[in-house]
Amino acid sequence: MTPDMRKRGNFKVFSGNANPALAKKICDILGVPLSEANVNRFADGEIDVRILESVRGEDCYVIQPTCNPVNDNLMELLIFMDALRRASAGRITAVVPYYGYARADRKPAPRVAITAKLVANLITEAGASRVITLDLHAAQIQGFFDIPLDHLYSRPAILEYIRNRNFENTVVVSPDVGSVERARSFAKRLDMGLVIIDKRRPRPNEAVVYNIIGDVKGKTCFIFDDLVDTAGTLCQVAQSIKEHGAAKIIAAATHGVLSRDAIERIDKSPIEELILSDTIPVNASKSAKIKIVSVAPILAEAIKRNHMGESISELFK
């Protein structure tokens, strides 16, 4: 911890069980120890959180992505914040590198839940004063919170990885119309062209490619998305652009959910490399194609700036 940070008072960083390795990296960068807490289960599976040090009046951060097992990790986050609130913490910030339940962000059909809003309500009611998250599935989810939310991007970590490689004749591919803004931001910063995939989704976790808007023939194609779940969409897009003459295909996503047989699909696909961040724990040894970049420096800087009362928007430049 720097002298300036000490002048602002103590702050403490806690971690749930979802991604302690990321929490440890963040603490190492900040120069603070990971604060102590016990997270246990009762015999019937109920979660029991006990804070093992005083937090009265202090600035507290709980690092917990709501990844698989989603419901357990979400409940753990909520109970953790409730424990901190009842221990008289001064301010509680939920650091949620991966925000689960985000894909249900509107009502596409009658009688369906908007779980992205429901989870926002739960986090707020549990005691969060602020939320820090990365690459939400849809930007409008920021408006679901009635407390401040800092929406960060893994883009700097992924861009650094790509710029350290010498790729030629390149183009950025948006896997669907909804991802155009994200793909355009990468294309602008990498000084590359943009290709858009016209994709339809007849049912969840299934996609059909109808049109490719732009030229991929003979090019190194970068597919950028916010997450890879079953990898069905990603592999379908990769196969389509390969059939249209793409020379090399590299995919990148912030959140490696990798459900079901996702890794097997990726290994069989024409994707040569899949770049993922460490918002979610990923066992890269399961596939030679998977490369991991860390978002710990981004989150550590956001925590530092939040504690110091400095601008978070500087991180977007």
Image (spheres, rainbow, N blue to C red):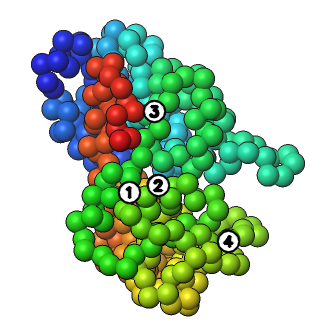
What residue type is disc 1 on?
A: Arg
**Mark 1 sits on what residue?**
189
Q: Residue at x 73, y 45 (%)?
A: 106
Q: Position of residue 242 (x, y in %)?
A: 51, 87
Q: Residue at x 38, y 50 (%)?
A: 154
Q: Could you say which disc has been placed on residue 54 in the image?
A: none
What residue type is disc 3 on?
A: Asp
- Identify the element where label 3 is drawn: strand
What residue type is disc 4 on?
A: Asp
**Mark 4 sits on what residue?**
198
Numbered disc in front, either 1 or 3:
1
Considering only order in the chain, which callout, 4 or 3, is on the residue closer to the N terminus?
Answer: 3
**Mark 2 sits on what residue?**
185
- Identify the element where label 4 is drawn: strand
Q: Nearer the viewer, residue 137 or 177?
A: 177
Q: Quadrant of the C terminus?
A: top left
**Residue 281 visible from this viewpoint:** no
Kindly report the distance in space between the C-alpha atoms of the residues bearing marks 1 and 3. 22 Å
Considering only order in the chain, which callout, 2 or 3, is on the residue closer to the N terminus?
Answer: 3
Numbered disc in front, either 3 or 4:
4
**Apparent side of residue 203 relative to residue 12 in the rendered image (left or right):** right
Numbered disc in front, either 3 or 2:
2
Residue projecting furthest to the right? 110
**Mark 3 sits on what residue?**
150
Numbered disc in front, either 1 or 4:
1
Circle 4 crowding by C-alpha within 10 Å: few under 14, some 14–19, many from 20: some
Vertically, is 222 above or below 226? below
Considering only order in the chain, which callout, 3 or 1, is on the residue closer to the N terminus?
Answer: 3
